[in-house]
Image (cartoon, helix red, strand yellow):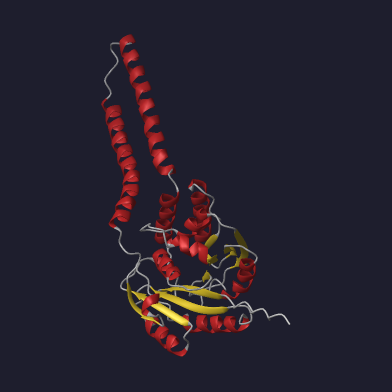
Amino acid sequence: MGEKSTPKPKPLISISIPVLNEEGNLEALYSRLAALAVEMEDRCNLEFVFSDNHSSDRTWSMLTELAERDTRVKAIRFSKNFGFQRSILANYLHTRGEAVMQVDADLQDPPEMLEQFFELWQKGYHVVYGVRRGRPESLFISKFRRAGYWFIDKLSEHPIPRNVGDFRLVDRKVVNVLARVKSPSPYLRGAIAGFGFKQIGLPYDRDARVAGQSKFNVSRLIRLGLTAVLNHSTVPLRAASFLGGVILALSLIGASYYVIYRLMHPDFPVGIASLHILMLFGIGLNAFLLGVIGEYLLRIYLILRAEPIAIVEHSLNFEPSELKSL
């Protein structure tokens, strides 16, 4: 009789959840994650990895209680708020799963979509991301987001899917590449899109927040958009060079015209106002171009300074060997 084949072990899937002042959402989130684990126990094992971006409410104490009740709950707390994107990246690096699903704690992105993500991952896709069909927000913010996605996609050196946030499942291969990212201000959805790999999107309708308020106002959306452009496009630098060349050419044409006109009309009056306008225009243009170049130089400086992505102050259900040096 032939030997029986050893059954293939079930894969471990990590669910990565960055949190900041989410005390009103944690219990509902954990209930849905626990129910999801039961639903998928025949296909995979789950771990729930939280990164607390130095919350000021009861978030960390609630995570401590959950970790005591359930060893699948793991959490790290940062020494200060390091920003949303760095929080996600640090959390990715503390997961152990063969694939990692990112989900927000406010439950606007349904964690139950892991079943569809998992099925596509098993078919060979390395990145499966949710594409937002609709979301409960004001018309102004909705239009502002759409314009931002269009602008970023047009300027980026590689296509970035539109209406896509950080709700996705990524293979361990992608996480290993992310571990080598040295950007002090990462834009993960752009970075992952630029890595290549086999990727696919799934449309879904975003739900309303269960509790609390969104951490993303217009100013934070603008800062995130600027990070996306400056991290994934050299268009601003090239536009600065192009614009400087155009202004120089126009100045030479204008100077030639003025000299010729003066030779033909010696009584042509000297224009003080036009001189002042041109001076102010030149000063403003130089300041703008220097600002664009300065933004890129600042990012180079921050990379060379090599600050950690985040500093872990406390951890729950992690072995010392599992804590990463960031």
Asked if 175 appears above or below 280 in the picture, the reply is below
For the N terminus, the image quarter is bottom right
Residue lying farthest to the right in this orientation: 1
171 or 203: nearer the eye?
171
Residue ID at (44%, 58%): 187
Asked if 229 appears above or below 172 in the picture, the reply is above
318 or 188: nearer the eye?
318
Asked if 62 appears above or below 117 in the picture, the reply is below
Residue ID at (37%, 65%): 83
Horizontal side, residue 104 vs residue 291: left or right = right
> In the rendering, at what x and y percent does residue 190 appear?
48, 56
270 or 289: nearer the eye?
289
Q: Quadrant of residue 243?
A: top left
> In the rendering, at what x and y percent does residue 155 appear?
48, 46
> In the rendering, at what x and y percent does residue 251 appear?
35, 25
Q: Quadrant of residue 314?
A: bottom left
> In the rendering, at what x and y percent does residue 175 appear?
48, 64
Residue ID at (40%, 85%): 64
Q: Quadrant of residue 324?
A: bottom left
145 or 190: nearer the eye?
190
